[in-house]
């Protein structure tokens, strides 16, 4: 960015959440790229399973936002001396369960990715088994974290009420930012990929059972 002339436009970023990201449009018109500036090879970005595995990283950030919301909600209730209310206690319990479920998903995904290749991105020339299963698992993680974060926000809003959703209370900003960040693209396609894979596995199992029954009848 310091070596070429570009035009920035930050006025377009009027989203309700993630205002602190200071997102901008960058116009690279007229910029000529030197060969030395290219990183990797063509289509490296779309190489699987690493493209899909990238969702694990943004899911971890999303879960961090949910954890921050749990903490801010707890602090708010303590400030108002409402920690003995049985309904508030139950909601905090649900929020804690949701965050813990998300953490377990992330730890499992990290272990699977590391077992597949110790270095994220792996060796482009290496051929390994298990990549399809890994991409499906990543999509499962993405879905589970989204659901966990949505549960946390729902309960947090009920805990703090309208008073806790007004600036400068931290819950207001966290919910606004997290709700926008959760809207990653192709969510339905990711979930459909999990279902398609599951149906395919069931079909394979069914074919195997049919072959076994056929062999048994022949005997």
Image (cartoon, rainbow, N blue to C red):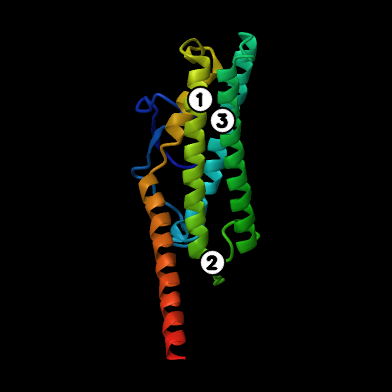
Residue 19 spot, x, y in % from top left? 45, 25
Point 51% across, 37% down: residue: 148
Do residues under tags 3 and 2 come within 8 Å of each other at their CB atoms?
no
Q: Secondary structure at mark 1?
A: helix
Circle on res. 130: 2
Question: If you read the primary sequence from the N terminus, does the residue marked by circle 2 or circle 1 appear first?
Answer: 2
Residue 84 vs 198, above or below: the answer is: above
Distance of label 1 from label 3 (alpha carbons): 8 Å
Residue identified by numbered label 1: 155
Do residues under tags 1 and 3 come within 8 Å of each other at their CB atoms?
yes
Residue 167 vs 58, above or below: the answer is: above
Residue 207 spot, x, y in % from top left? 41, 75
> In terms of depth relative to the viewer, which is nearer, 101 or 45?
101
Do residues under tags 2 and 1 come within 8 Å of each other at their CB atoms?
no
Distance of label 3 from label 2 (alpha carbons): 34 Å
Circle on res. 206: none
Kindly report which numbered mark, 3 or 2, lies closer to the viewer in this rendering.
3
**Is residue 135 visible in the rendered structure shown here?**
yes
Residue 159 spot, x, y in % from top left? 53, 18
Label 1 crowd bin: few (<14), some (14–19), many (20+), radius 10 Å: many
Label 3 crowd bin: few (<14), some (14–19), many (20+), radius 10 Å: some
Residue identified by numbered label 3: 94
């Amino acid at each position: 960015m310091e070596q070429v002339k570009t035009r920035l436009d930050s006025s377009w970023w009027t989203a309700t959440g993630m205002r602190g990201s200071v997102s901008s449009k960058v116009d690279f018109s007229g910029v000529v790229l030197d060969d030395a500036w290219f990183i990797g090879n063509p289509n490296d970005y779309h190489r699987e399973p690493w493209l899909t595995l990238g969702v694990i990283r943004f899911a971890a950030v999303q879960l961090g936002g949910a954890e921050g919301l749990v903490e801010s909600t707890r602090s708010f209730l303590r400030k108002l001396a409402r920690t003995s209310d049985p309904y508030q206690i139950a909601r905090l319990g649900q929020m804690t369960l949701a965050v813990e479920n998300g953490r377990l998903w992330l730890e499992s995904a990290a272990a699977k990715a590391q077992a597949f290749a110790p270095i994220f991105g792996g060796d482009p020339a290496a051929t390994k088994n298990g990549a399809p299963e890994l991409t499906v698992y990543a999509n499962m993680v993405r879905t589970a974290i989204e659901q966990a974060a949505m549960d946390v926000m729902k309960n947090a809003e009920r805990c703090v009420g309208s008073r806790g959703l007004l600036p400068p209370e931290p819950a207001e900003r966290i919910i606004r930012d997290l709700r926008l960040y959760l809207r990653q693209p192709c969510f339905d396609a990711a979930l459909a990929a999990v279902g398609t894979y599951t149906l395919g596995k069931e079909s394979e199992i069914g074919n195997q059972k049919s072959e076994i029954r056929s062999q048994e009848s022949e005997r």
